[in-house]
Amino acid sequence: MKSGYKKIVLIVVLLWQVLLLAGCDYYASEQPAQQAPVPFYNRDSRGRADTIGKLGTYSISIPAGVIDGWARYMGDPGDFADPKIKARYQRPPESYDLPIESFGFQYRITDGDIYTSFRKTEEDYRHDNETLIPYGKPFPWAGVIIYGEYDAATPLNFNFTVQNEFKLAKEITHFDYIQQEQPLYGLTVYRANNGIDPKTGEPWKWDDNAKDIFIKKDQTGNIKTYIDCQFTHNINSCHHMFFNDDWHIRVWIGYSRTYLPQWQEMEGNIINILNSWRVTREGKLLGKQIGKA
């Protein structure tokens, strides 16, 4: 009888311990996950929060309404990634240390200002679209894309890009790029087949492959600025790229060839814009933001 009683007591104790453990697990699972601290956000006059992160070497706070589209952070799935991958992806919490891969905005070449929604530049941009582009007049706005460069093994120059461009021209279109005797606007100039269309014997008028190439080297001989200007359906456009060693970024700019003489001013103004967005790791602005609404 005593042995039977002892067995019953032992079973009750064991069951009680199991219930206690289950309760602990349940309690633990019900506790909310520890949340990352919410960063401080700078805001515009309408209360819209800035886009934050780290671009290359500096923390930045990009004014609301400036970015054309959205900012892409390092690790974000690409636009054409598998929808299942996009659905599973969870971006790390926002902070002033979260590396930004790229973002774009519109820059006005004539005065160095930028497009911001709910600011006068939004109205100006719309007006120029309606009154200049349909009539083939030079459009004073440049599309800008900024890329953070985080791979230490990648050189911050266009040496390979230019060499490869010349190589492909020789292999595919069967003409050489010839360096011109005189620089233009401080840039070294290369013209496809010395600027002559081999089919007509006259200067190029239209050919996607016959770009004029302009480069600028630094004191060590590395190509830091690379510009190509095309002849396409009477629209002479330029694609302009440059590296900035201080920021550790690559910048792409697209604009009408009319504004090529201002290439150096554009580079300086774009860096000034980025400098105006710099903040401390806590989000404190280091200057007055250009483009803030």
Image (cartoon, helix red, strand yellow):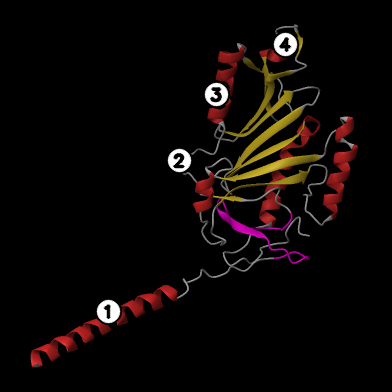
Question: Which residue is tagged 3?
Answer: 164
- The amino acid marked with disc number 3 is Asn
Name which of mark 2 and mark 4 comes first in the sequence.
Answer: 2
Question: Which residue is tagged 1?
Answer: 18
Task: State how far apart marks 2 and 3 are (Cα).
Answer: 19 Å
Residue 177 among magenta residues? no
- Label 1 or label 3, whichever lies nearer to me, is 1
Residue nearer the viewer, 75 or 219: 75
Q: Is residue 264 above or below residue 273?
A: above
Give SS at disc 2: loop
Instruction: Residue 241: give x, y in percent of width and height.
Output: 64, 36
Bounds of the magenta segment: 43-65
Name which of mark 4 and mark 3 comes first in the sequence.
Answer: 3
Residue nearer the viewer, 159 or 135: 135
Report if the CB atoms under discs 2 and 4 are less than 8 Å apart: no
- The amino acid marked with disc number 1 is Val
Q: Is residue 6 above or below residue 168?
A: below
Name which of mark 1 and mark 3 comes first in the sequence.
Answer: 1
Task: State how far apart marks 1 and 4 are (Cα).
Answer: 87 Å
| Tag shown at residue 197 | 4
Residue 62 among magenta residues? yes
**In the image, 78: left or right of 195?**
left
